[in-house]
């Protein structure tokens, strides 16, 4: 993937940042003062998200494949991948336990006495149907689901885990066949450049998607209808802040990186993720900036795409908080054993969550299947605030995937320290 000077990236996105801010304000005004008009512009958000989904699968395939080929040897790939997975699992487990412990300590959801109705069950039926993508078949089913029926089906279905599997297999084979695979490597590198350019073009539509999302959400829920869930939302935002400031901040300091300068370096990407509630659109820019600040390309090429499916720390926080909230709201008593089962199930189901429509609700439905005493229909309570939750969830996952390559690069001693210091000193 071709490199772009840091200044060019900043210039390209600075104007976009202001457009996103203006679109957010306009969306709020439309949603508040002309709510009847909001449904007519809902297509703008759907269009933007579809464009992202269209391009992100092929882009991730190319990036991972080239990352493995660029690493030089399968031994290097295995070492990097092993350390990355160890870090991912440690972080997701820690954040999940933190969320569950906090929720139990504060008793979130107690006093609501929520009883799901038949209408509530119908509202969450679509999400519950999608849950089979993450839950059915147990461990054996999960392992089999990693393998696409055909290479093309992984892309047509938008199954990120299958794309990851196929990319890893392709990269490993290309590393072994040597010069015979050079034309294929060159083709994949060219396709990577193509889809990187395509994603930069798509991101120009971000203000349109943000405008539609803010307008329709404000019109549908209003500014006061989600008041009864404000405490849940506020607690989630607080835990995401704790995770970013203390967890990730500590890892950055241990890696010799100033957290404030690091955050400023990614300020344009953060603004886009905050307003669009998705980090897919900034994937090329994220990887370019990590390379520009001194993290070696093969580390970035392996860790970042893998993190998009395996390093979902903010989603883990949401799952832990939501599960205890729903149990308390429905008056369901959970034993220590049941909580342990839910934690393990949540860690399992969240691994296939990237790219699934209504991701958080789908994962919750799949996880609740492990504890049938909690009514799945109770998920309707969280539908009303899912967009607001999605803002913090997206930025938390994005922050985690910004920091992970720095941690792994430091662990492997594969960061240009002089370049890092020089790049961050100007931000």
Image: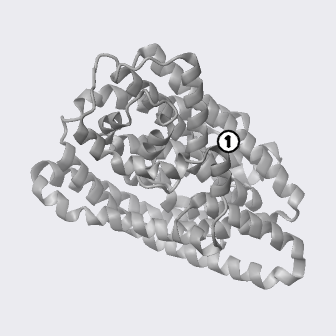
Asked if residue 405 lies left or right of residue 105, the reply is: right
Q: Evaluate whether residue 402 shows in this view.
A: no
Q: Is residue 58 above or below residue 344?
A: below
Q: Is residue 193 above or below residue 164?
A: below
Q: Please state the horizontal and vertical placement of residue 389, each as a whole percent of the image.
A: 38, 40
Residue at 64% across / 72% down in the picture?
150
Residue at 56% across / 74% down in the picture?
195
Asked if residue 244 lies left or right of residue 364, the reply is: right
Q: Which image quarter is the N terminus in?
A: bottom right
Disc 1 crowd, CA 10 A, few/some/many (<14, 14-19, 20+)? many
Q: Evaluate whether residue 35 shows in this view.
A: yes
Q: Please state the horizontal and vertical placement of residue 142, each as a whole percent of the image.
A: 63, 50
> Residue 350, located in which quarter of the rendered image?
top right
Residues 1 and 220: in front is 220
Residue at 63% across / 79% down in the picture?
191
Q: How many marks?
A: 1
> Residue 276, located in which quarter of the rendered image?
bottom left
Residue at 76% across / 60% down in the picture?
298
Asked if residue 142 lies left or right of residue 113, the reply is: right
Colour basis = one colour
The residue beneath circle 1 is: 88
Q: Secondary structure at mark 1?
A: helix
Q: Is residue 213 above or below residue 244?
A: below
Q: Please state the horizontal and vertical placement of residue 9, each as a whole percent of the image.
A: 54, 65
> Residue 403, located in which quarter of the rendered image?
top right
Q: Please state the horizontal and vertical placement of residue 103, each as a whole percent of the image.
A: 46, 21
């Amino acid at each position: 993937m071709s490199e772009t000077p840091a200044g060019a990236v900043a210039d390209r996105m600075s104007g976009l940042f202001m457009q996103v801010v203006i679109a957010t304000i306009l969306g709020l005004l439309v949603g508040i003062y002309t709510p009847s008009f909001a449904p007519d512009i809902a297509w703008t958000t759907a269009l933007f998200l579809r464009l992202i989904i269209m391009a992100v699968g092929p882009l991730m395939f190319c990036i991972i494949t080239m990352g493995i080929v660029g690493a030089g040897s399968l031994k290097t790939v295995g070492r990097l991948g092993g350390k990355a997975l160890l870090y991912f699992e440690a972080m997701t487990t820690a954040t999940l336990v933190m969320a569950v412990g906090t929720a139990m300590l504060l008793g979130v959801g107690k006093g609501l006495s929520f009883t799901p109705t038949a209408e509530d069950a119908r509202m969450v039926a679509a999400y519950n149907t999608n849950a089979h993508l993450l839950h059915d078949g147990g461990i054996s089913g999960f392992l089999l689901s990693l393998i696409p029926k055909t290479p093309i089906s992984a892309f047509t279905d938008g199954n990120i885990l299958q794309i990851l599997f196929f990319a890893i297999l392709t990269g490993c084979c290309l590393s072994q066949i040597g010069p015979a695979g050079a034309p294929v490597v060159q083709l994949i590198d060219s396709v990577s450049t193509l889809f990187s350019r395509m994603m930069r073009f798509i991101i120009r539509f971000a203000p349109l998607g943000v405008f539609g999302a803010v307008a329709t959400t404000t019109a549908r829920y209003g500014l006061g209808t989600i008041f009864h869930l404000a405490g849940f939302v506020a607690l989630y935002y607080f835990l995401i802040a704790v995770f970013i400031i203390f967890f990730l901040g500590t890892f950055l300091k241990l890696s010799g990186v100033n957290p404030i300068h690091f955050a400023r370096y990614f300020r344009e990407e953060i603004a886009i993720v905050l307003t669009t509630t998705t980090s897919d659109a900034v994937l090329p820019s994220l990887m370019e900036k990590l390379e520009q600040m001194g993290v070696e390309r093969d580390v970035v090429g392996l860790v970042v795409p893998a993190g998009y499916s395996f390093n979902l720390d903010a989603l883990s926080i949401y799952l832990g908080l939501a599960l205890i909230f729903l149990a308390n709201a429905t008056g369901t008593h959970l034993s220590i054993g049941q909580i342990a089962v839910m934690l393990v199930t949540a860690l399992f189901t969240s691994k296939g969550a990237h790219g699934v429509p209504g991701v958080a609700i789908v994962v919750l439905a799949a996880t609740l299947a492990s504890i049938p005493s909690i009514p799945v229909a109770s998920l309707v309570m969280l539908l009303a605030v899912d967009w607001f939750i999605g803002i913090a969830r997206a930025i938390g996952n994005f922050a985690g995937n910004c920091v992970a390559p720095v941690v792994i690069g430091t662990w492997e001693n594969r960061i240009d320290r002089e370049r890092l210091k020089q790049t961050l000193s100007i931000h």
